[in-house]
Image (cartoon, grey):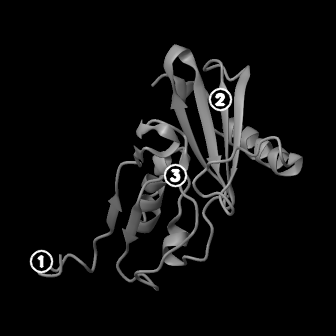
Amino acid sequence: MKRLKLDDDTIVVFWSDHGWHLGEHGIWGKFTLHEVSVRSPLIVRVPGQPKPGSKTTSLVETVDILPTLCDLSGIKYGKRFQGKSFAETVLCPDQKARESALSDLPVDHGQRGWSIKTATHRYTRWYESKANKKILLEELYDHVSDPDETRNIVSDDGEILKHHRSIMDKRLAEINQEEVYRK
């Protein structure tokens, strides 16, 4: 890019596929809602970035990449994307883009799992069907004391569970689930 003099006006995004279990939780594969499976690497370089090479702990989602690129490029996009721009985080890594990151996983027999990652926990809810009516199972992991998600603490702390249930309900209400289910 430097040789071609493109580095002064080109945004570069390095983003890869999500993770893969290598025996964690007795799984050899990638289709779960555990952190090792849903986490994806993401690096964004913007010409003139105030702190190039900085790291952030901010949460973002894959759907946030397009509105971010639009904002960084000065392209107006209105409300046509589900994602939320994290352009401010790219320019100032201390800025938090989201309170939580949402993931979902449709499984056999019409069941579906939804999971949110917050700064300290992962909360996952498994539903009987796509209609999100009957909850089959809940999982809650403390990423501070248990980053490998080996101990489901869903029955340990009512306040933390209540807080994460509230975040999940809010996030599910925000998205157009009918669009998601057509996939």
| Residue that protrudes farthest toward the left in the picture | 3
Residue positioned 41% across, 59% down in the render: 41
Instruction: Write down the residue under mark 2.
Output: 126
The residue type indicated by label 3 comes to Glu
- On the rendered structure, is 161 left or right of 48? right
Please identify, in this view, whether the residue under mark 3 or under mark 2 is nearer the observer.
Answer: 2
Q: Label for residue 61?
A: 3
Callout 1 environment at 10 Å: few (<14), some (14 to 19), or many (20+)?
A: few
Q: Which residue is mark 1?
A: 4
Q: Quadrant of the N terminus?
A: bottom left
Q: Outermost residue, right direction? A: 159
Which residue occupies the foreground of this view, 143 or 90? 143
The disc labelled 2 sits on which kind of residue? Trp
Specify few, some or many for label 2: CA neighbours under 10 Å numbering under 14, 14-19, or 20 or more. many
Q: Name the kind of residue labelled 1 in the image.
A: Leu
Picture coordinates of residue 172 (x, y %)?
68, 37
- Position of 90 with respect to 167 (left or right) is left
* 54 versus 111 height, above or below: below
Q: Is residue 78 visible?
A: no
Ranked by sequence position, the earlier of labels 3 and 1 is 1
